[in-house]
Image (cartoon, grey):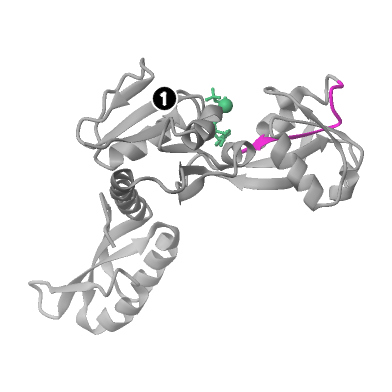
Amino acid sequence: MSTLQLAVQKSGRLSDSSLNLIKECGITFPTRIARLKASAFNFPVEFLYLRDDDIPGYVADNVADVGIVGKNVLMEKTDDLEVIKELGFSKCRLSIAVPREFDYQGVKSLEGLNIATSYPKILSDFLKDNGVSADIHEISGSVEIAPSIGLAEAVCDIVSTGSTLVSNGLLEVQVVMKSEAVLVARPGLSGAKREILDQLLFRINAVQAANSNKYILLNAPNKAIANITELLPGMRSPTVVPLAQEGWSSLHSVVKEDDFWEVIENLREAGAEGILVIPIEKMVL
Ligand code: ATP
Ligand code: ZN
């Protein structure tokens, strides 16, 4: 029987979220990551625990079939893989930052500078697209200290909150790319492996839909049902169940997490009472 080999980061900012997603897909596996490989107990997948930088290469070279990696690392390492799914975690951006006192007037201000980065390919493409020529100084870690030790005049580095930059006297001036974890695959994956990937994808979609939606129950006088139904986009239309009390009903529906507070306000104004909001475990559309 075929097994899908899935490369995940061994330890780092992607690891916990990658393995959590797999767990939420109902896939169980040995919890200790002492080894390089582990097979899931109840799904035909084998995990390869690797450094994130090696994941695109291993997938491209057929060592693993699919992998979970940051889009930033993917773009830096190879153009040969297919992004199957954006996973919505480990969100960050690759940005250019300059010393606070630098008079930044737009990308043209980077002309002729020496820029330190761990992402020479992405940076060089960005500069080329913007018609700027600058020297790229590749370093593998602690890029943010390069200007203060005189190694570079600007940096191009991963930013999430920006606090590391600030504490090094740097100012983020230009977003080069936005990144998040992605599920990648080698194009043209074989029949049996593709089928396993499709099953995995089906589960990931159900988990993601569930995580971005809430189940909502509320009571309302029957005369308010039409208005309230307008406010509840739901999967199709709300379920309406009569209450024991004459003239009242219970409405059940699904609301998007992002719209949640606004919807609740509007529902209350329309006459809804006893609103319950419940997390959804899985959602198949
Ligand atoms: P490895 O030892 O596997 O090479 P690493 O030190 O290169 O790990 P991490 O710091 O664990 O990498 O980051 C892995 C990925 O997580 C990054 O490539 C990026 O996509 C994302 N990431 C990095 N920093 C942050 C952050 N502050 N917030 C959210 N995501 C981040
Ligand atoms: Zn790395």
Residue 273, horizontal then vertical, whole percent:
26, 67
Residue 226, horizontal then vertical, whole percent:
28, 83
**Residue 18 lies in what quarter of the image?**
top left
98 or 127, which is in the foreground? 127
Mark 1: give few (<14), some (14-19) or many (20+) Cα within 10 Å. many
Indicate whether residue 229 is drawn in magenta: no
**Residue at the extreme left of the image, as rendered:** 244
Name the residue rendered at 32%, 81% in the picture: 227
Quarter of the image with the C terminus is bottom left
Above or below, 214 relative to 38: below
Indicate whether residue 160 is drawn in magenta: yes
Quarter of the image with the N terminus is top left
Q: Secondary structure at mark 1?
A: strand
Name the residue rendered at 28%, 43% in the picture: 25
106 or 36, which is in the foreground? 36
Whether residue 67 can be seen here:
yes
Residue topped by disc 1: 49
Q: Amino acid at mark 1?
A: Tyr
Residue 220, horizontal then vertical, whole percent:
23, 74
Residue 120, horizontal then vertical, whole percent:
73, 34
Whether residue 275 can be seen here:
no
**Residue at the extreme top of the image, as rendered:** 34
Name the residue rendered at 44%, 65% in the picture: 262
Magenta-highlighted residues: 150-161
Above or below, 256 relative to 231: above
**Residue 48 lies in what quarter of the image?**
top left
65 or 90, which is in the foreground? 65
**Residue 140 lies in what quarter of the image?**
top right
Task: Count numbered badges in the picture.
Answer: 1
Ligand 1 sits in quadrant: top right
